[in-house]
Structures are given as C-alpha cells and as structure tokens.
Image: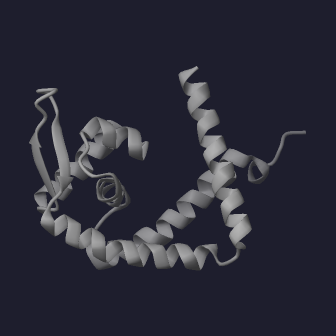
Amino acid sequence: MARKLDDFLPYQMSTTSNAVSDLISNDYKSKFGLKIPEWRVMAVLGSRGVSTQRELVEATLMDKVTVNRAVKTLADRALLDRSPNNADGRSHHIMLSQTGEELYDQIMPAAEIMEQKVMLVLSDEEKQNLSAMLAKIKQSADDIANG
C-alpha cells in the first residue's frame, strides 16, 4: 500500500514552509507592498550585504528569472542600488539603498514577532533541535545535489 502524501516528510516540510511564509508575507505585503521573492532578496541583502544576482539566486534558492524580477521591481521602487562588478563585467553588485535599509528595518521586527507567535508551540530546546535538524537535512540535500 502506498504511503499517504501527508506522511511524506518533504511534503510536510514544503507545506509548513509555505504556510509560515504566506502568513508572514501577507503581513508585509499589505503593509509594505512586497511579494515573497522581493522580501527574500531584501532579507538576504539586509543580512549579508552586497551581493551579485548569482549570489542572490544561491542564497534564496529561487530561480534566476524570479530573482531578476524581484531585483528589477525593488530597483524600480528605489529600494536597491547597483554598481558595476569590476571582477565580472557581466554582473553588478546589488545592495539595499538608504530607502531599502529603512524599509528592511521596519519589516524585520514585524517578521520576528510573527516568527515568535508561530514558534510559541515549541520549547526552546525543540526550536534548537528543529533548527539543527533542518540544517542537517539541507546539508544532505546539498551534498546529494553536488555529489
């Protein structure tokens, strides 16, 4: 007999991730006019600093077209700045603009509050264990993909 889809761990991880992302994104979509890909690009730039578009693709695990659209939308809203990448003439360094940094600083506290609400069902130890397990699963997936 085939396993039920609801018992398939990758399905559970995907639907849980989508539910949490949707919950958080609905909040900043209505308040700040950002879609999930745009927020992910801003979040990476806000936490890691200057990146190329290729680095954004790798960090967000979104496809090139999605990242490109998000970067264009954010640049059109003056939330990003670009500068030439002297090491690679085909790419640019992308960073949050002053306006982008100010918006990031408004969104992060709201996202963190929502994270805290969602995670209230877990003890501190469970949160640490979940984080460690997710890191191990991601590393395993990366190893298999690169193997």
User: Measured from the top left, where is residue 17 in percent x and y?
Assistant: 57, 58
Task: For the C terminus, give its image quadrant.
Answer: top right
Residue sitting at x 40%, y 46%: 60
Seen at 72% across and 73% down, the residue is 123
Q: x, y (%) of residue 101?
A: 22, 66
Quarter holding residue 120 = bottom right
Question: Which part of the image, by quadrant, shows the N terminus?
Answer: top right
**Colour approach in the figure:** one colour
Can residue 145 be seen here? The reply is yes
Foreground residue among 110 and 24: 110
Front-lying residue, 105 or 70? 105
Residue 128 location, x and y as percent?
A: 67, 61
Q: Is residue 62 left or right of residue 105?
A: right
Left or right of 81 on screen, residue 127: right
Residue 49 appears at what percent x and percent y? 27, 52
**Residue projecting furthest to the right:** 1
Residue 62 visible to the viewer: no
Is residue 113 placed above or below 68 in the rendered structure? below
Where 39 sits versus 124, above or below? Answer: above
Q: Work out whether residue 121 or residue 10 is closer to the camera in this orientation and state it.
A: 121
**Can you name the residue that lies furthest to the top here?**
147
Compared with residue 107, is residue 95 higher up or lower down, i.e. above or below? above
- In the rendered structure, the answer to whether residue 141 lies left or right of residue 74 reads right
Which of the two residues, 28 or 55, is positioned nearer the viewer here? 55
> Which residue shows up at 49% across the image and 63% down it?
21
